[in-house]
Amino acid sequence: MRKLVSMSNPFLDQSTLDYQLPPFAAIEDEHYLPAFDAGFAEHLTQIEAITASAEEPTFENTLVALESAGGTLDRVARVFFSNSVSHATERVQELEQRIAPRLAEHEDNIKLNRALFQRLRQVSTAGLDDESARLVEEYVKSFMRAGAELDDDAQTTLRELNSTLSALSTEFSQKLMKDTNDSALLIDSIEELDGLSPDAISAAATAAADAGHEGKYLLTLILPTAQPALELLTNRDVRRRLHEASVNRGNRANGSNTLAITTRMATLRAERASLLGFDSHAAAATDSQTAPSLDAIMDRMRDLATPAVRNARAEAAELEAEAGHAIEPWDWAFYAARVRRARFDVDLDALRPYFDLERVIADGIFYAANRLYGLTFTERPDLVGYHPDVRVWEVFNEDGSGLGLFLGDYYTRDTKSGGAWMNSFVDQSDLAGTRAVVVNNLNISRPAPGEPTLLSYDQVVTAFHEFGHALHGLFSDVTYPLFAGTSVPRDFVEYPSQVNEMWILWPEIVANYARHHETGEALPQEIIDRVHAAGAWGEGFETTAYLGATLLDLAWHSIASGTTIEDPLAFEAAALADAGVDFAPVPPRYRTSYFKHIFAGGYAASYYAYIWSEMLDADTVEWFRSSGGLTRENGDHFRRELLSRGNSVDPLSAFRAFRGRDAELTPLLVRRGLA
């Protein structure tokens, strides 16, 4: 029997839970549409009150009023769109198809409102503090980039483009999730899984049983091209099948093919960019980033591509010598692991027994945050998340004051998108009187009941990385919501999260969490030393795969308005060849058909951000090492000058305040083996 919906809608009022955590236990799917309707109406009424004012535009009656508006819409949108990637049931997917275009229309109703734009332009910054003056400037620039200065006909066209692109992005995401689930590789016998660890085989058996294939084994897919099992499976044909399942997602003759969507999105984005006065979507997207120009980005990526591919070819020669045959994409990880073991005596998969999820979280990630920043974490089982898998911790400063809430959603499921990410349910803001509520999502295979969740080394890296985003949100100390937490340029947002990866093998941290789940034995120091020594091995592959995706992204979004693309796969091949990264054994980290970052993730023409941010990260790691490493003084300096500032100051100015100078490129080149 269908449960009756409560007469009261939990989104219509501010949550009374600690830190305004959304009341997930009271939220039902039927609450979303009415809450969005109420939120749209409330927000437009508030905007109309601003524009209808007979008073001269001031900071208080225009900017503060604008920043204070839209509370209901903000509450429901944050929960709904988090669920649309974390727990996308069929009903949520149906609702998203209806809501996403309406939200795009609503955003246009705000950003294309000429009366509001004129009031913003008339607000004087004289006498304002720096953050308030920046708020005025950033709002004016964002309205201009959104098309507020266009005439009526152009704005009508722009609205149609934005609505269509929003619907296409939703369709891409939903088709990709379905095809990723459908493409999981079903294995009949345990013999075909030779090479996998017992816990990995157990997880595959559990996944198969959950999918209705009792007695078989299911290798589920993660979002990038490379699949973890390829490093371990001794059966070459199973490796081939798993690789092909990965690279053909979204490119099969079924109802989940995404290629027509990607092509249409790229051409519509080019048309929109032209309407806004830009040569391409890439030019428009990078206009608001920290990178000086699109040309500068292209030059840097191409400069990195040549030595990266050269290194990849050298690595391939070593792998072929080890294998005794030509290396195919499904062979690379397997033989790279062999070479790594032979050269450095490092078997990364053998480290899994030392990486129990519970210890990684409590004794690794949280412990590092305590040593650096004085934070403590208390799990709150009385506070529930949006799914039974979700756990909630309250985060405290060293003085005992509450900082916010951290939610962890670690296991994969059919209703969750692939990959890993951080979202915010509540942003910190002095104006609103709020503190941060953030969530990390990972996609770890669930073990059999009673067995520990053992992570691969790559999954440990991902967990530390995503917690770096969480710290960026939790440490936010700004006045205005627009500037809170991770609301920084796309090519800066990955920087703090990359820095947090440095603590994974830091002596005091790794000794505290990396302990064998059965014996309690610490991960031996000689193994840690060998992992460090092996760190640069394989960077040719990693950098080439990353640059392949980056340059593919830039190619799709550098097309001019009016361009016709008949064959998206031919376009993809030509783009990789033109960029010099078409090395067959190393496919791009994402191919077009499953490149969710750029077609449904906000990274269109911005996937370069990871390596652009890594320049800052590598330089910051050098600073920590030369300044004493894991100390409260260093952590407090990083928190105060950078992590807490959000976008309330120019991000590169914040970096200079932290580092004492601009970033230097050399540490990145050394790390990537490109010096």
Image: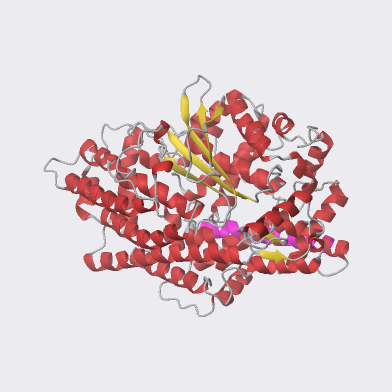
Give the x, y percent position of residue 165: 40, 65
What residue span does the magenta drawing correspond to? 295-318
Magenta stretch holds residue 447: no
Position of 532 with respect to 36 (left or right) is right
With 460 as the anchor, is 99 left or right in this view?
left
627 to 325, vertically: above or below: above
- Secondary structure predominantly adopted by residues drawn in magenta: helix
Horizontal relation, residue 440 to residue 127: left or right = right
Residue 387's x, y, as percent?
Answer: 50, 46
Q: Residue 379 appears at what percent x and percent y?
A: 55, 31
Camera-nearest residue between 232 and 571: 232
Quarter of the image with the N terminus in it: bottom left
* Residue at the outermost top position: 399
- Asked if residue 299 lies in the magenta stretch, the reply is yes
Residue depicted at 41% across the width and 47% down the height: 79
Picture coordinates of residue 70, whole percent (x, y): 29, 45
- The image quadrant of residue 63 is top left
Residue at position x 67%, y 56% in the image: 543
Q: Nearer the viewer, residue 91 or 366?
A: 91
For this orientation, the residue located farthest to the bottom is 566
Write the residue at 24% across / 37% down.
59
**Residue at the farthest left position:** 54
